[in-house]
Image (cartoon, grey):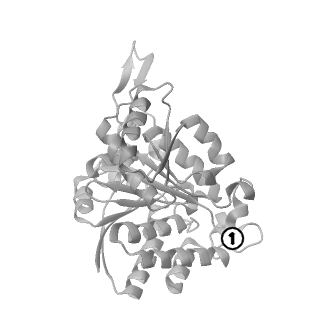
Amino acid sequence: MKLNIALLAGDGIGPEVIAQAVKVVDAVAVKFGHEVSWTEGLTGAAAIDAVGEPYPDSTHEICLAADAVLFGAIGHPKYDNDPKATVRPEQGLLKMRKKLGLFANVRPTFTFPSLIDNSPLKRERIEGTDLIILRELTGGIYFGERGRKDDGNTAFDTCTYTREEIQRLAKLGFELALTRSKKLCCVDKANVLESSRLWRETVQNMEKDYPEVQVSYEFVDAVAMRLVQWPSSYDVIITENLFGDILTDEASVISGSMGLMPSASKGVHTSLYEPIHGSYPQAAGKDIANPLATVLSAAMMFEDAFGLKAEAEVIREVVNKSLAEGIVTEDLSGKEGKAYKTSEVGDWLAKNI
């Protein structure tokens, strides 16, 4: 199979972790007889520095022409620390999501047997955790009307959703639940928010089309509590943009490291695969960043974008092997273990594939 992949390294540690994922993808392609075509595009601070905007048209065209997009990270301190900056790297991410129609962020949370004691939560609370949060990405408060009034002393941000936006995310959630444990939880704040009441009403109306799926409805504050008390009770969670942003970061610590969790963003035109961590500028250029989340995002890409489950499983197996044998970067090596460089981990993974 020929795999046409857009490669957006981005900022900070993005280029370093992306480079290791490329090694792994290329090794898998050789093993299984695939042909990979990589096309690089600029985004984030790197794109602002080069062309003055964080998601240029040239990058958009590269993404549209690709079968899938493999993405690193966005963000740079020179923009984070300047509140007057009118163009920011993160604007590129929002623009990319909107233009590519990336409406559903797929965030799995699971544990690794060899690292279960690295989690800040007790072993007995997190054993067996295997859940997926579907976060709506292109609606809600991040894209609603906003502004200031009363001479700048009053600010407002508006959360707006259409029934269609909710239906398309919920449809993915129901379909995903059918392939797993047939449990779906809709997370909202329907006791307070009108937009949440539309979410609950819409999902309730869809239940009849998926009679095998057991559906529950919970308030976001209760879920935030239960995610650290009893995460294994959840299977598939669907929720709106802001709630999903918060809950997915909370869930990410269950595994013991943000450097381990992959994600996908499903879109109208294409799908994008990326690690859940940020650009971590303090580590940029030091060859110390953990590449495993990016590598596992590539595994998601093989299975989801190309339907190549065996290839995805090979990647997951070699990652588990690296963790079990201690071939890890400094964030996972501990005081007694050896810390490998980012590039060394990537080389080891590719060689073992």
Q: Residue 45: x percent and y percent?
A: 39, 51
Residue sitting at 33 percent across and 83 percent down? 34
Relative depth, front residue between 165 and 14: 165
Relative depth, front residue between 241 and 290: 241
* Residue 48 seen in the figure: yes
Q: Residue 161: x percent and y percent?
A: 34, 34
Farthest-out residue, top: 150
Q: Which image quarter is the N terminus in?
A: bottom left
Relative depth, front residue between 346 and 15: 346
Q: Is residue 113 left or right of residue 306?
A: right
Relative depth, front residue between 269 and 71: 269
Q: Is residue 40 left or right of residue 200?
A: left
SS at mark 1 in the image: helix
Residue sitting at 22 percent across and 64 percent down? 65
Q: Residue 349: x percent and y percent?
A: 53, 79
Residue sitting at 73 percent across and 66 percent down? 334
Amino acid type, mark 1 = Ser
Residue sitting at 35 percent across and 87 percent down? 33
Residue tagged by mark 1? Answer: 114
Q: Is residue 116 left or right of residue 5?
A: right
* Residue 291 seen in the figure: no
Farthest-out residue, right: 336
Q: Residue 186: x percent and y percent?
A: 48, 42
Above or below — where is 105 with respect to 289? above
